[in-house]
Amino acid sequence: MMYQRSPQTGVIDQIVIDAPAKLNFSLAVLDRRHDGFHEIESLMVPVSLYDRLHMQRCPDGEFSLEVVFAGRLAGELSHSLACDVPDDDRNLVLRAARLLAERANVEAGLRIRLEKHIPSGAGLGGGSSDAASTLFAASKIWNLDWTKDQLAELSAELGSDIPWFFAGSAGLVHGRGEHVTPIDGIPALDVVIACPSDGLSTAKVYAACEPDVQRRGEAASLTRYLQENSIRQALPLMHNSLQQPARTLTPSVDALLSDMAKYDALHPVLTGSGSACFSICRTAKEASQLAACLESAGWPYVCPTRCAARQMDKACLE
């Protein structure tokens, strides 16, 4: 996070903050709850793929959002992978900013520029991550004394998976996804992420999923194996209950997972409700080779990257 202070007042009036993508190293869909949502257990891990938010205080109380597509999403690719990112109050960024202003009785507004690097509708958590980073940065710009726990609690009103992004690390999540136990010691594994051109509806994928109660407790076991760097034992536990429904609903997901296996991906898995899939790799060279094969096969979005520790409050002067 980078910030700039006003030369007149000395307070922070501009912030640039990165919002990381996430991968579900495991996702078990358990029983349906009384509120209609499913109980889940998941090991979620941040990766070094980020959206970037430029935020500036607006004393007049106005809120505005500009969305631009950058990196691998720039140009023609943005039309297929990120065309559903709104720049109005449907975007979680503006909803998060307005919600915090309302609850904290803030009269100032924000001018926000969102650089999208994370494909949307892909199960990578880009929108939720953007919302979490917005809440954190806005609290600094408005000089609020809210803790990250308070911000995380507020964020749960906007989406079940947003609170995890305040953990600052990998985390075990349960409930609807709002209960988070931060996890240390996950190695910085090389991974390759790939997406087909079409996204998936989270609601449709969950509706097609049968409860996977026999997977209860596997996320904790997977965590222990990864902390011990026992990759061979960890691989069978890298499972997503939504993977088979996603393959059935979207043939391109099935084709992508098949291609990843054909090119010797170690263990291809769907992340979230899709449509993105990933595989961990033994080395950076292996990741580069897998990425090159997938790009040659014509997949529109391929990103070799790494698991990353993420510290939301680590700041430096711009």
Image (spheres, rainbow, N blue to C red):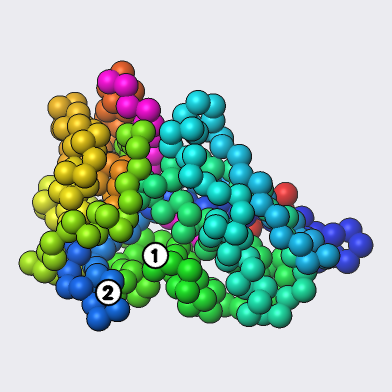
- Residue in the image at 39% along x and 47% along y: 121
Is residue 287 found left or right of 49 in the rendered image?
A: left
Give the image quarter of residue 264. Answer: top left
Marked residue nearer the N-terminal end (1 or 2): 2
Residue 129 in the image: state x and y as whole percent: 48, 57
Residue 142 sits above or below residue 194 on the image: below
Residue 235 in the image: state x and y as whole percent: 15, 49
Instruction: Give the quarter of the figure containing the N terminus.
Output: bottom right
Is disc 1 surrounded by few (<14), some (14 to 19) or many (20+) residues within 10 Å? many
Residue 228 in the image: state x and y as whole percent: 21, 57
Q: Residue placed farthest to the left in the image?
A: 214
Q: Nearer the viewer, residue 247 or 295?
A: 247
User: What is the magenta range?
Assistant: 297-311
Residue 317 sits above or below residue 148 on the image: above
Label 2, secondary structure: give it.
Answer: loop
Q: Amino acid at mark 1?
A: Asp
Give the image quarter of residue 11. Answer: bottom right
Residue beneath label 2, please?
36
Is residue 57 found left or right of 244 in the rendered image?
A: right
Q: Main secondary structure of the magenta part?
A: loop
Q: Is residue 81 magenta?
A: no
- Residue in the image at 43% along x and 67% along y: 159
- Residue in the image at 45% along x and 73% along y: 156
Q: Nearer the viewer, residue 268 or 69?
A: 69
Is residue 6 found left or right of 180 in the rendered image?
A: right
Which label was assigned to residue 161? 1
